[in-house]
Amino acid sequence: MSQTTEHPAHLQHHFSDVHQQAESAKLGMWIFLLTEVLLFGGLFCFYAIYRSWNPEMFHNAHAFLNVWMGATNTVVLIVSSLTMALAIRSMQLGKRKLTMWFLAGTVFLACVFMVIKYFEYSHKIHLGQLPGKWYFFEGIAGTNPHIFFSAYFLMTGLHGFHVLGGIAVITWLFIKTARGSFSPEYYTPIEMTGLYWHLVDLIWIFLFPLFYLIG
Amino acid sequence: MKDDAAQRHILPLNLYLAVGSALLVLTVITVAVAQMDFGPMNLLIAMGIAVVKATLVAMFFMHLKYDNRIYMLVFVGSLLFLAVFIIFTMFDTLRRGDIYEEIAEPYLKEAVIYRTAETTTASSHPAADSSQTAIKTETETETSEQ
Amino acid sequence: MEHTIPEKHYLNEATGWKSWLMTLDHKRIGILYMIMVMFSFFLAGVFALLIRWELLSPDKIFMGPEMYNQAFSLHGIIMIFLFIIPSIPAILGNFVMPLMIGAKDVAFPRLNLASWYIYVIGFCFAVYALFAGGIDTGWTFYTPYSSESTTAVIPILTAAFVLGFSSIFTGLNFIVTIHRLRAPGMTWFQLPLFVWAIYATALIQVLATPVLGITLALLMLERVVGIGIFDPAMGGDPVLFQHFFWFYSHPAVYIMILPGMGIISELIATFSHRRIFGYKFIAFSSLGIAFTGFLVWGHHMFVSGQSDLAAVIFSFLTFFVGIPSGIKILNWIATMYKGSISLDSPMLWALSFLILFSIGGFTGIVLGTLSIDVHLHDTYFVVSHFHYVMVGGTVMAIFGGLHYWWPKIWGRMYNETLARIAVVMIFVGFNVTFFVQFIMGTQGMPRRYATYLPQFQGMHGFSSIGALIMGVGFLLIAIYLIHAIFRGKPAGPNPWKSLTMEWETPSPPTAGNFEGQPVLEHGPYDYDKVIPENSLKPYKTL
């Protein structure tokens, strides 16, 4: 046993070994993801109830969403999940530069997602397809079409907010990787951020059909 | 080190690429299927495909298949409690008006923001709409029967 | 036997305000919480006294109805969000739990400190709201009034939202700590029951509080942006707010009581000098309460306009929630049977709990009965029920726990005679205040009313006297407990002769808790196998 692995620099004093520390971080992160599921879940409940009360309106309103932009965004997030997973794998193999490429790729794809969202949002704002009392678009048949857009902006908005958070954290990871903070023995922050990023992807996997593909 | 070995379960590159490809294929499928109409099954099919995609992401990208089972328990647990929230709330929202028709839909079917200047002269009180007049006529008939 | 305060301990190993405000020591963080939380208790208590003063007469004494609405709203909000929900987990959970499991600290000490700072930010928003117009919606913030009230709704919602994060992070920290940082040999069924209770509470905290977060955010958007989701004029549903709100707030009451029950397990076992009866039943009942607590929130909404199907389901499920609580009470009583009981002041708090929580719990079942609740909803019966469980339950447990662990936290003992006087004052004062409220409720006295029919004046007056007695009692407690910090007699490591691991450290403990990694040598309730002493014995380490 070498000296550095017996008490590595990254081992915090209240943990007895790196394994306990890593497994604690993982459990902590999964519990945090649990809270995110419940947070978004509240909005999914809101969606479910209002869609069950206004099924036709939801169907009519969704036609004004651009399926291709939504599908592109889905593809973008899936690929970004892949690059994130590969970033972790690269650090497991000790390939620092490759890790940086994958992290940068993830950030780039996340930014593409936000740009597409920007175009979608500005189009809707222009047309007046806005939440609640700001709604002024005419041309959607059914009861209270503003509710669809309340749900749309709330859910994609909260999701987008989480994408922005992810961009910030992954950028920070990129910088730390460049500085050599991580190694095959210690890459926990990258792994934990990966879990977070996959959840962001997961939520979009459900948002996409619920808003863009109402049959 | 025995500590590192436990953490160092490195999945093969091909597995990641295969899962990624599967996710993209499923995306294509879900968009294609959405162009067809299966009636009430539409939602079920779309959600079913989404669940398959989500499972792939969770099992492989998030490593749940290879990790200690407690993490899967945490994740599934969150979904279970979310399901309770949605289902129990819908015991209320979908079954109002079971006994009394009038309380079935307490909200305005045509929100105030859609009313033009002409129609709002009738009453500024948002409660005065078609769903509420049903209660009024009910009580009127009750009093007239007495 | 004369004891001395150890030379170096966590309180004096570093001095100065920076060493406190930047501390990563769970014990110091527990004390930081104690200061804020107990101050909030005092503040909310002042509002309670203002309410009871106003209710001495049906006519206005000094508060008109608008002011009165603010008084009960602020009393509720401060008591619930700033005091009772954080109380036991943040103060005693932080201080005692890592010691009980043989750990050096919690899993994420920096997150722990962050949780405290987040609490302080929430506290500041609440104080700001106090001066920015107050709040008159009731702590329940029901729509549509909360969408329209001209009081400082947004600041107080922000406060509750921020405080929610403090709760979530504390819960997350505790779950990971209990899973990962237990001493070698300490299996799940060798954990003290206080730890099981904190664990079950933490599960509720992480599962329920995010929904409160989204609920408050939606209400804020409703007010600021006008999305109209709770507004019938916009096609929204105000009852939906209640579903969202109570999905958190019902499990929240189990966040309030479960840690209290954990304390009672420790107190009953220690002061009966007997193995706890039905350990596994008590442990699993904590989990049972946590789980079933999520299934019953609609019992707050029986007269809201929810569907009859939902009302029946929620009422039926509510009966099940009482079962695990009942199991605990019976097991505690069975623990005392043939035990060697000492009536030290912590035990007197525990005995008060047994009586008062039982009354509160039974009346909860009464209210859970759909047909009865239709008449008792929004009456003083409800007010009395929840005060019996929250004050007669949790507050008794908090003070029992504070008295029990006070010598461990500060190394010094408080005045036992004054402590016994205080617990009797609180017990008597509490019952004088709240028992008549059950009667008033059944006679139709509505809650949240600044005025009332003349026939209730006698009972209201009686109730207000009880509040005064309680106020004096709590003041007395503050005086002798604070006095004990500086002038109490050194207590020694194990003044109550308990077998849980925190008593194997000196009083006060060292900054690092233990020398080396302690290993479990006996179970927490092995009173039939081990005779504990008030002295430091060397413990086995790895």
Image (tube, coloured by chain):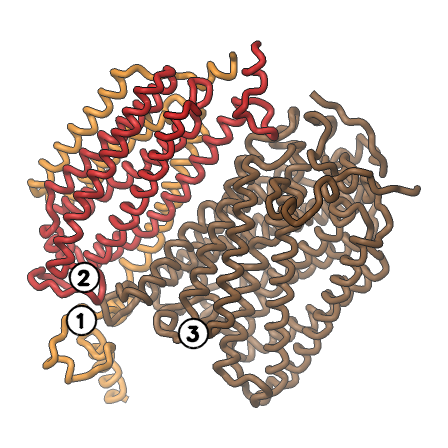
Indicate the quadrant where residue C137 lies.
bottom left
The hue used for chain C is brown
Q: Which residue is mark 1?
A: B113
How far across and down, in percent of the image, does residue B91 sit? 32, 56
Q: Nearer the viewer, residue A140 or C394?
A: A140
Q: Are marks 2 and 3 on the same chain?
A: no
- Mark 3 packing: few (<14 Cα in 10 Å), some, or many (20+)? some
Residue in the image at 60% along x and 62% along y:
C40
Residue tagged 2 = A146
Which corner quadrant holds the N terminus of chain C? top right
Left or right? Give the position of B51 relative to A189: left
Q: Left or right? Give the position of C6 relative to A40.
A: right
Does the residue at mark 1 contact the one at mark 2 (Cβ under 8 Å)? Answer: yes
Q: Quadrant of the C terminus of chain C?
A: top right
Three-letter amino acid code of the residue under disc 1: Ile
Is C495 rendered above or below residue B58? below
* Letter of the red chain: A
- Mark on residue C151? 3
